[in-house]
Image (cartoon, rainbow, N blue to C red):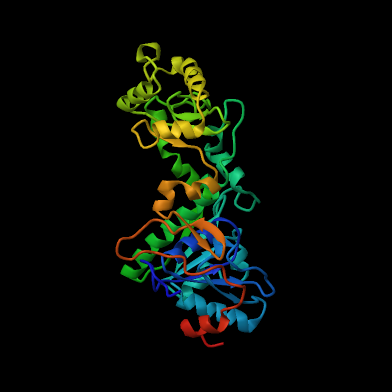
Amino acid sequence: MKAQGPLKGVKVLEFVGLGPAPFCAMMLADMGADVVRIDRPGAHGGGAAEVLARGRRSISLNMKDAGDLAICRDLIGKAEILLEGFRPGVMERLGLGPDAALALNPALVYGRMTGWGQTGPLAQAAGHDINYISLTGALGAIGTPETPVPPLNLVGDFGGGAMYLAFGVLAGLLHARATGEGQVVDAAIVDGASSLMASQHQLAAMGLWNTSRGENVLDGGAHFYGVYRCADGGHVSIGPLEPQFYALLLEKLEIDPDTMPASWTPGDWPAARARLAEVFLGRTRDEWCAMLEGSDVCFAPVLNYEEARSHPHMAQREVFIEIEGVHQAAPAPRFSRTPGAVQGPAPKPGADREAILADWSVTP
């Protein structure tokens, strides 16, 4: 596929790792950037099933080989953005840390993705998404009153990590193009996930949030913002935060509002939740969809990822696409003039060496 998107022409060098850094590179590639993956010799993989690696080209380089190391340095000299997701110090030991890279390319934006950050007492400790969001207070706020529940790895790896890395390197790119000055972007999941908690900090400052799970308006405490089981075992979600939407919900459920508490009276929430739970158990999920979906009661069925693909709204917007039989989300967000696109399936490691060297004007 011919590259397309608002980042067409931007050269990105990705040192292959796991999790959030590849997701960031996927986002950049979806927007048209020329993302070159540096794989280890002998690496396996590639193909449409590797969704996080889609849209790139790959070159295999052995950093212990002088010739390959020289190629790597030349690629760094031609790149606008570099992405790496190793523990602090790994790139420095390879002789490819920020100081060396910026000496080769003063306008380079050097993106570093870690969980704990480049500094701090835990910087060298191993960890994963669940550990990072534990330290930020995010995991402690999600779950049942009895126990925190991991929200997949969306809050840490991808929300607090990859997306902040993407935001950071693109902000750095704007600065570099305007001034010729590159810089290091230290994207730590503990920083990003903490940033995502801004609204909870605001609510707490206003006296509208406490640290007990299941007692707040957005964590399952409020009867008008939550998930309910249906007669067929399916679930639906409601979220009528505004009084007029809450009133409409009660009307459609044929509940006398005089028998229900004011929506923002926390002490009455448990009894009200029990009342709504009884009502929602009276119909199947599809029956509730027929009655409530599309109205202003703030309603949606709780779907699994396979069901989501066939929902009429998601299908009409083409939220999901299929590449070589593999279903996956389409590039987001959408652009009116320069739409992004999946540039192709994940490359086989090392498959694009000659084309990359030619396109980036690097001589072995």
Check the image and report above or below for 150 versus 106.
above
Q: Going 53% across and 88% down the picture, which residue do you hit? A: 363
Q: Which residue is the extreme one toward the bottom?
A: 363
State how many labels appear.
0
Where residue 202 sits, quadrant-wise, is top left
Quarter of the figure that contains the C terminus: bottom right
As drawn, 69 above or below 29: below
30 and 161: which is toward the camera: 30
Residue under the point 42% across and 29% down: 204
Image coordinates of residue 324 in percent, x first then y, are 56, 66
Q: Position of residue 170 (x, y in %)?
A: 40, 62
| Residue 237 in view, yes or no | no
Q: Position of 203 compared to 58: left or right?
A: left
Residue located 47% across and 57% down the image: 165
Q: Which of 351 and 291 is in front in this view?
A: 291
- Is 165 placed above or below 355 here? above
Q: Can residue 328 be seen in this view?
A: yes
Furthest-right residue in view? 42
Question: x, y percentage for residue 224?
Answer: 42, 25
Camera-side residue of 92 and 296: 296
Residue 287, image x, y percentages? 47, 31
Give the side of residue 293 with respect to residue 212, left or right: left
Would you identify the image quadrant in which residue 49 lies?
bottom right
